[in-house]
Image (cartoon, helix red, strand yellow):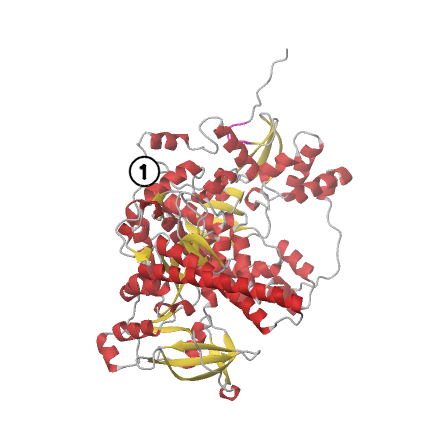
Amino acid sequence: MPQALLPMIPDGATQISDLISVVRQDEQWTYFCGVQPVFQHPEGDRRSFRMFTAQLCCQGVCTQAQILRTFGVSKNSVLRSVAKYHREGIEGFYRPRLGRGSSVMTADVTARAEKLLESGRARSEVAEELGIQYDTLRKAISQGRVRKPDPMPADKACVHPAASHPLIVPTDKSTRSDADAIAGDEMGVACTRPCERVMASIGLLSGGATTEFQPCRDVSYGGVLCALPALAENGLFRHLATLPVLSGFYMTLHVILLLAYMALCRIKAVEQLQYQTPGELGKLLGLDRIPEVRCLRKKLSQLSQDEAPERWAGLLSQEWMERNPELSGTLYVDGHVRLYHGKMTRLPRRFVSRQRLCLRGTTDYWVNDALGQPFFSVERPIDHGLLEALRSDIVPRLLKDVPGQPTSEQLEADPYLSRFVVIFDREGYSPDFFREMWQEHRIACITYHKYPKEEWPESWFTETQVAMPAGEILLLKLAEMGSRIGDPSDGLWVREVRKLTSSGHQTSLISTSYGQLGLENAGQLFSRWSQENFFGYMMQHFAIDALNEYRTEVILGTNRPVVNPAWRELDRQHRSVKSKLTQRQARFAALTLHPQAKESDMQKWERQKADLREEIEQLEQELSVLQDRKKSTPKHLAWEELPEDQKFERLAPSRKRLTDTVKLVAYRAETALATIVREKISHVDEARSLVRDLLRSDADIYPDQTAGVLAVRLHTLANPRSNRAIQHLLDHLNAAELTYPGTNLRLIYSLATHQINESLVPS
């Protein structure tokens, strides 16, 4: 049996195949077969490099794939070199090029092209202005005849990690997948940090795993790193000390960052992580892998103890209001029913307007700004409507948190000045509530008129330009006058503004914001669509209604009454009997108005009337009994008085509050990115779609500890228009100069124009 021979390579060499290796030293590239040198060329001799690598491939000493992995050159370059070697041999690489005619790239044209490129003009624009072909300019740039401008100042230039060590090759997906699979045979899939994990298991790893990035190409979801500056700006990494301290390998920062990445990448549930590649997502955190589902559930439970998520969300809400006082002065309040289809508890039924059904669930009342950005939400398992939620929970919190409220002296000096404005739909229409808010708190309310009177003459309406909160200008037909609502003896004077639609319909709104103009009230109320869009977008993209855990909790210490089950059953029976009675009465009236002419039909007609009269009398008697029983039965009961078999439990709120807070930060971050992208896109509706594609795209990650840089190179998108918009976004992100949390690496973003590792290829 022949004996297997171990491959022999020189010390410090990079192996290309089992026989061939390469060493770069003193600006020379030396190739070895075993330990014997076989070829050498200067570092800048590209012709010799292409010739010899093509010769190695043609002689079967190594494969084209090995050349690609070792040197990072493009596949097309290797294919062209091999084809040229087959066709022309060695001489073909050194034969001088054929002469060409006079070049259009004269010294004057070259200087003008370099000046235009340095000013930030696109190559296509420069070629058009100079009157030359685009390919002519592109070739001149690639050949070095036209100097390409630096993408950023020299002091901020991204140093490629391979520059510090010429033989470090960034890993690709295949290499990482193989390494993760090998680790799975020992400690676990992608657990390539065994020492830290063993120390964490025995309690010797204080401070959790260190954040260490490795040079990687084509990292899945690598584009989500572009959201880090926006996440930091919106407070994701602030006040984390209010959450419990985690122990072990994964710390609080790792878990919160992972939740944010999941939200932005549309991984809508913790359970969906089992279908993702753990090592790829781990590279985005500077770890070997992300926690498995069971571990992450445990970490979330620890972070959700002692109402810590509620405190964290409250601090962030206050910060958002203080940073945008002009937006927090006008607040939009609306309820959203979070449906529950489980069997752990029987939640009361709520009317769901989007499905026009009464379904079991929990009502959340959201407070947003005029742009649809959320401030906070209030969960109410026992709900008595919007007005009760405003009085009990929302208004007291707003009085404490809304910044820039006028002082008592200012309110006394100006009788029309309000603290802030609250806007809601017709559910909150109540003259008594409007009077209470204005007289007790000086809070202005705007809503639709629930009971508008006769229509106004069309001549009263004039076309008016209305500035919406998002900045757009609408042309609306508006009319305004004072109106009195409520009881004639104890009513309230309000401002009434009506909008005339193209179909002739008049939409009426009422407002107690006396210090504003009517068109301002109209612009604010007609912007309610932003909050409705927020609900729809969060349900579709961020799974705001999804359950995060199946645990329930006992409702303790509530002072809110609940509907008496006995009264609810009597009310159901009363409505059923009333419906049957109305139907019989209608049939009896029809028979009375249309008597039969024939004698045979007359007898049948009289018999039908007699039967209906008897049924009507029975139903009237039954209805009277039910009415008496309803009057004697209390409609509401205290929670303690409710029968035990009718009591229900609430859905455990802590873990959902934690994940929802991260989702709110992620939504605000995505909105900020879309706002920047919108500056370069003519179709504003495409901005969010483009940002979503960017965040879910692959990217290359190049850390450089010496320079203190974490370079993120994004792959180009589908078309130049999208690339220009994304480059505009990356310029803003680079200006933020954010340091990756937990490291000293400054994030630098760039948009790749090709995938060649230039540091390993002779120029």
Q: Residue at x 50, y 85 (%)?
A: 461
In the image, 350 versus 169, the foreground residue is: 350
Badge 1 amino acid: Ser
Q: Residue at x 63, y 44 (%)?
A: 74
In the image, 190 versus 116, the foreground residue is: 190
Residue 48 appears in the figure: yes
Whole-percent x, y for residue 155 in the image: 44, 55
Residue 12 lies within the magenta run? yes
Q: Residue furthest bottom?
A: 459
Residue 281 lies within the magenta run? no
> What are the residue bounds of the magenta stretch?
10-14
Whole-percent x, y for residue 226 in the image: 47, 53
Q: In the rendered image of this protein, does residue 175 appear above or below residue 714?
A: above
Q: Quadrant of residue 75?
A: top right
Whole-percent x, y for residue 603 in the image: 62, 65
SS type, badge 1? loop
- Neighbour tally class for label 1: few under 14, some 14-19, many 20 plus, Cα within 10 Å: some
Residue 373 appears in the figure: no
In the image, 295 versus 391, the foreground residue is: 391
In the image, 583 versus 289, the foreground residue is: 583
Q: Main secondary structure of the magenta part?
A: loop
Q: Split into 4 quadrants, where in the image is the N terminus?
A: top right
Q: Quadrant of residue 251?
A: top left
Q: Is residue 415 left or right of residue 13?
A: left
Reading the image, the residue beneath label 1 is: 247
Q: Residue furthest left?
A: 409
Q: Residue at x 40, y 37 (%)?
A: 295
Whole-percent x, y for residue 506 in the image: 50, 79
Q: Residue furthest right?
A: 87
Q: Is residue 235 left or right of residue 180?
A: left
Q: In the rendered image of this protein, does residue 312 appear above or below residue 464?
A: above
